[in-house]
Image (cartoon, grey):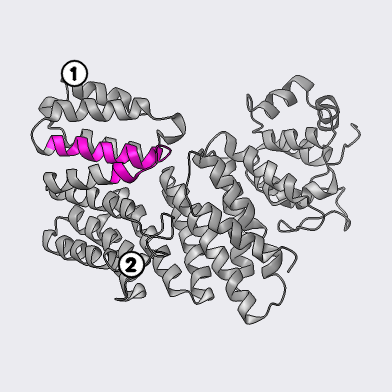
């Protein structure tokens, strides 16, 4: 009978390791155990496995699938069965933590490292399980302080300046880690004003996490995080933030093939924002204009875009700041570029594309790529499909791998689908198809 090698108790309260256990991602589990001081040889001995096999699993080169092996890992590392969807193990007693939301004794830096590690390989099933666990844990507390609220609010403001050249997955890891630090605050009674500040910061962090997930092409997870952000924003009483969340959520169906659903959400955002000139009202009008353009409702699209222009002209300095929560001139023209391109108004679209590119920082990798794809689509509308395909293929090839996914690929694929079937065998169209990720 092999002697067990129990995981350090604090690890069994870590939400990110718990997410890996639920997903039965033993690469994350073995790597965490190793960092905590257990050698691969010791893990192998405790779990009746070969050391080479443990090492392969920890590196992601192999997986554990069989129920027998999973039970041996549970017994060998003294992991309660409930954490992996198993029945209680014979050795389990009352001194073993089994609640998946336990937080006591967990080093916040270790949670951050585990979350970043889970996201390092992209949006894998384990990474998505980690994100989903954090969001669900917050949802449970929301229906109902150990962290510096001022720090969280400052962090939210810093994140609002966007990617600034950062890898989207890395930014997502940081956002969700700071979001996670709010949980202890929601678990204890707070004065009404403090609770409102907490909810507002949570709505901002969850909303920005949803934006990054949207940009990475993870639609379902983006919608779930937008839902949490909307609940937090509603609890905070910040109508502007609530309208912003709805408008940004509308961009998920807008960019991934459901424009009518996007128009409905955008109208909800416009209603929540009201007629006053605010950043969220201007954003909601822009998104509505784009959605109506995609549905072919030219009249409604033009009316929404005219309203967006009206609002943009009245914004104060704070509302027109270049942040995710502001509606700056550059962002305004990015929205106009897409709407006018879809409407086939290529001259006006090019004016917005040129202005947006002038105002975009060199580090605005994704925004600049989308503007160039819009410009290529205008070429297609003008009859130069060959050059449109070549230009879009060039954009994709120049993009760093972290950005060659999600929204940029969707927009490029839409252009390819607009190519007449009889022309798809031509070299330029084939070149575009080959540049699209499989």
Q: Main secondary structure of the magenta part?
A: helix
**Is residue 430 at all visible to an observer of this figure?**
yes
In the rendered image, residue 128 lying in the magenta stretch gets the answer no
> Is residue 45 shown above or below 339?
above
Distance between mark 2 and mark 1 Cα atoms = 47 Å
| Residue 313: percent from left, percent from top | 26, 65
**The magenta segment:** 356-380
> Is residue 109 shown above or below 382?
below
Residue 62: image quadrant is top right
Q: Between 169 and 129, which is closer to the camera in this rendering?
A: 169
- Circle 1 is placed at which residue position? 427
Identified at 14% across, 35% down, the residue is 380
Q: Report the number of discs.
A: 2
In primary-sequence order, the first of circles 2 and 1 is 2
**Element class at badge 2:** loop
* Quadrant (top left, top right, bottom left, bottom right) of the N terminus: top right
Q: Residue furthest front?
A: 317
| Residue 268: percent from left, percent from top | 33, 70
**Is residue 182 at all visible to an observer of this figure?**
no
Identified at 25% across, 46% down, the residue is 355
> Is residue 240 shown above or below 396?
below
- Circle 2 is placed at which residue position? 315
| Residue 226: percent from left, percent from top | 46, 60
Give the crowd class for mark 2: few <14, some 14-19, many >=20 residues within 10 Å. some
> Is residue 6 shown above or below 305?
above
**Element class at badge 1:** helix
Q: Between 381 and 134, which is closer to the camera in this rendering?
A: 381
Q: Between 390 and 114, which is closer to the camera in this rendering?
A: 390
């Amino acid at each position: 009978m092999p002697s067990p090698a129990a995981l350090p108790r604090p690890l069994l309260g870590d939400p990110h390791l718990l997410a890996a256990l639920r997903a039965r991602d033993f690469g994350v589990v073995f790597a965490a155990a190793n960092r905590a001081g257990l050698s691969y040889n010791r893990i192998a001995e405790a779990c009746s496995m070969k050391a080479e096999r443990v090492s392969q699993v920890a590196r992601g080169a192999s997986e554990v699938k069989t129920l027998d092996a999973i039970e041996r890992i549970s017994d060998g590392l003294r992991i309660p069965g409930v954490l992996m969807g198993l029945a209680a193990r014979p050795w389990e007693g009352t001194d073993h933590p089994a609640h998946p939301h336990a937080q006591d004794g967990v080093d916040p830096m270790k949670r951050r490292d585990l979350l970043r590690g889970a996201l390092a390989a992209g949006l894998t099933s384990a990474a998505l399980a980690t994100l989903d666990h954090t969001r669900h844990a917050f949802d449970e507390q929301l229906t109902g302080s150990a962290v510096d609220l001022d720090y969280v609010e400052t962090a939210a403001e810093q994140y609002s300046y966007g990617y600034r050249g950062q890898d989207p997955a890395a930014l997502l890891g940081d956002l969700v880690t700071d979001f996670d630090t709010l949980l202890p605050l929601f678990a204890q009674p707070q004065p009404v004003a403090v609770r409102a500040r907490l909810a507002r910061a949570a709505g901002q962090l969850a909303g920005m996490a949803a934006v990054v997930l949207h940009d990475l092409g993870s639609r379902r997870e983006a919608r779930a995080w937008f839902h949490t952000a909307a609940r937090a924003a509603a609890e905070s009483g910040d109508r502007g933030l609530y309208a912003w969340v709805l408008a940004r959520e509308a961009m998920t169906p807008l960019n991934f093939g459901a424009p009518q659903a996007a128009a409905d959400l955008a109208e909800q955002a416009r209603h929540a924002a009201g007629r006053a000139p605010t950043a969220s009202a201007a954003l909601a009008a822009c998104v509505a204009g784009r959605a109506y353009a995609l549905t072919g409702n030219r009249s409604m699209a033009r009316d929404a875009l005219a309203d967006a222009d009206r609002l943009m002209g009245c914004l104060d300095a704070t509302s027109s700041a270049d942040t995710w929560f502001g509606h700056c001139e550059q962002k305004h023209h990015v929205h106009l570029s897409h709407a006018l391109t879809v409407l086939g108004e290529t001259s006006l679209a090019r004016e917005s594309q040129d202005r947006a590119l002038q105002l975009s920082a060199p580090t605005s990798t994704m925004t600049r790529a989308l503007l160039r794809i819009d410009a290529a689509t205008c070429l297609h509308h003008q009859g130069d499909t060959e050059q449109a395909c070549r230009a879009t293929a060039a954009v994709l090839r120049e993009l760093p791998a972290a950005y060659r996914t999600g929204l940029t690929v969707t927009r490029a694929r839409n252009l390819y689908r607009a190519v007449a079937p009889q022309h798809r065998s031509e070299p330029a169209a084939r070149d575009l198809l080959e540049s699209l990720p499989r």
